[in-house]
């Protein structure tokens, strides 16, 4: 049996020179013209790291801003209901307009402004009793001339919400004394 993988000697052709298998031309650098194709380099990939850092920084600034506002609104800024309690304690006007005399009727604009102070309070009891008290005071102030006896019907809710507001203000360390002259 013969070995199929055994190397064979090239057979001479008709002219007596040995026949070698054909070879493909391989250009060698430095010999002859170089190919016109530049060397292939991988594309320069853009890094996403600056984008990720930028988005992360924007989110962090937004979160800090929201947290700062919550702290300012919840703890630093004075509650509007507590400010109204302090104005009642000090005997000053709760509304910005201090031109009213003691006998003047409550105007609708003043009623809405004071009610809004109590309505915007963070404290539930101040909000509840302050708005209810302002509603009762508004109803009493709208009684027609000569019907003052009708105010007696409002005495129960008036005293309930007035004492409730005093208690709610006292819970916030503001003592409102209504017996002062």
Image: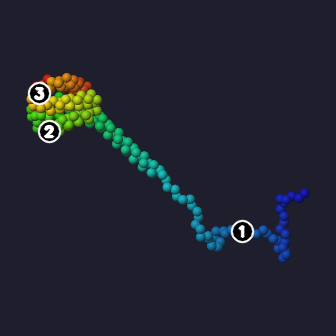
Density class for disc 2 (Cα within 10 Å; few <14, some 14-19, many ≥20) is few
Which residue is labeled 1 in the image? 24
Q: Nearer the viewer, residue 137 or 171?
A: 137
Q: In this view, does 6 lie above or below 139?
A: below
Q: How many labels does the image show?
A: 3
Q: Which mark is residue 97?
A: 2
Assign the N terminus to one quadrant of the image.
bottom right
Residues at marks 1 and 3, CA–CA distance in whole angstroms: 121 Å
Is the C-beta separation of discs 1 and 2 under 8 Å? no
Residue 169's spot in the image, x, y percent? 23, 27
Residue 11's spot in the image, x, y percent? 85, 69
The picture quadrant where one finds residue 135 is top left
User: Of the residues under marks 2 and 3, which one precedes in the sequence?
Assistant: 2
**Residue displayed at 28% across by 32% down:** 122
**Residue displayed at 14% across by 34% down:** 106
Q: Which of 34 and 62 is in front in this view?
A: 62
Which residue is labeled 3 in the image? 148
Residue 102's spot in the image, x, y percent? 10, 32
């Amino acid at each position: 049996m013969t070995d199929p993988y055994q190397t064979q000697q090239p057979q001479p052709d008709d002219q007596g020179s040995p026949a070698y298998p054909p070879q493909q031309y391989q250009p060698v650098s430095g010999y002859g013209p170089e190919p016109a194709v530049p060397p292939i380099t991988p594309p320069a990939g853009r890094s996403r790291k600056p984008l990720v850092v930028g988005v992360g920084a924007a989110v962090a600034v937004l979160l800090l801003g929201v947290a700062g506002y919550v702290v300012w609104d919840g703890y630093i800024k004075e509650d509007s209901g507590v400010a109204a309690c302090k104005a009642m304690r000090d005997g000053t006007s709760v509304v910005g307009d201090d031109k009213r005399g003691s006998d003047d009727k409550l105007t609708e604009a003043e009623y809405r402004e004071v009610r809004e102070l109590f309505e915007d309070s963070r404290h539930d009891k101040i909000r509840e009793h302050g708005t209810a008290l302002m509603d009762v005071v508004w109803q009493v102030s709208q009684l027609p001339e000569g019907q003052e006896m009708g105010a007696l019907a409002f005495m129960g809710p008036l005293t309930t919400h007035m004492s409730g507001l005093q208690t709610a203000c006292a819970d916030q360390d503001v003592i409102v004394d209504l017996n002062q002259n």
